Amino acid sequence: MEQDEPASVSDLFWAVARRLRHASRESLAPWEVTPSQLRALGTLVRHGPVRPGTLAGHLGIAPRSATEVVDALEERGLVLRRTDPDDRRATLVVVTDAGRELAGALRAARASEADRLFAALDDADRTELERLLRLLLAESGPTEPAPASGEGRPPPI
C-alpha cells in the first residue's frame, strides 16, 4: 500500500467524499453559488417559504450565518423576504422563480458530477453501495443537527 493510500474504511469513505465535494464545488463554480447557498435554495424549494431562523435550523448553522446566505441570495434575485401573513412582525424567505430554476440547474450539474464519479461501478455495485449508505444513514439517526441550545429551534414544518 502506498503511503498516501487510505488505510481504513473510514479513510476510504472520506477520500471519496472529498472527491465528490471537490467535483461538486467545480460544478457550482460557473454559477458563483456557494454550497451553503445551494443548500438554502434546496431547502426553500423543498419546504416553501420559511422564517430565517427555521432556515438556519434546517441548514444546521447559526441564524447570523443564515442571514448572510439569504442576503447573498436576495442580492442576486434568487430569494425574497416577505412579511409572514400569520405574524406581521416576522419575515419569511421565499424562493423566486429564478432561484427555483437555478436550483434545478445546479441539482442537475451536481448529479452529473456524481454520475461521473460513480461510473466506475457497475449496476450491482451501485445498488449495493446505495443499500449500504442508506443503512448507515438509518442507523445514525436524524440527518439535520440540532442547534447547540434548544433556543431558536422552530417546530417542524
Image: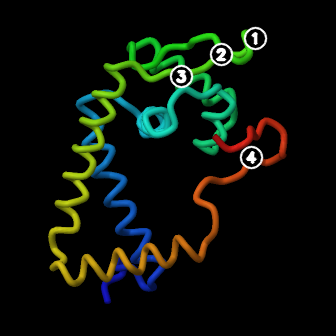
Q: Could you give the CA–CA distance between mark 3 and mark 2, rounded to whole angstroms?
A: 16 Å
- In the rendering, which numbered label is found on residue 70? 3
Label located before the other in sequence (4 or 2): 2
Q: Is residue 143 left or right of residue 45?
A: right
Q: Residue at x 63, y 40 (%)?
A: 157
Q: Could you give the CA–CA distance between mark 3 and mark 4, rounded to whole angstroms?
A: 19 Å
- In the rendering, which numbered label is found on residue 84? 2
Above or below, 74 against 117 in this view is: above
Label located before the other in sequence (3 or 2): 3
> Looking at numbered disc 2 in the image, what kind of residue is underneath it?
Asp
Above or below, 82 against 62 in this view is: above
Q: Which residue is mark 4?
A: 147
Badge 3 marks a residue whose secondary structure is: helix
Tag 2–tag 1 contact (CB < 8 Å): yes
How many marks are shown on the rendered structure?
4
Which residue is nearer to you in this view: 69 or 88?
Answer: 88
> Looking at numbered disc 3 in the image, what kind of residue is underneath it?
Val
Image quarter of residue 8: bottom left
Disc 4 versus disc 1: nearer the observer:
1
Badge 1 marks a residue whose secondary structure is: strand
Image quarter of residue 154: top right
Q: Which residue is mark 1?
A: 89
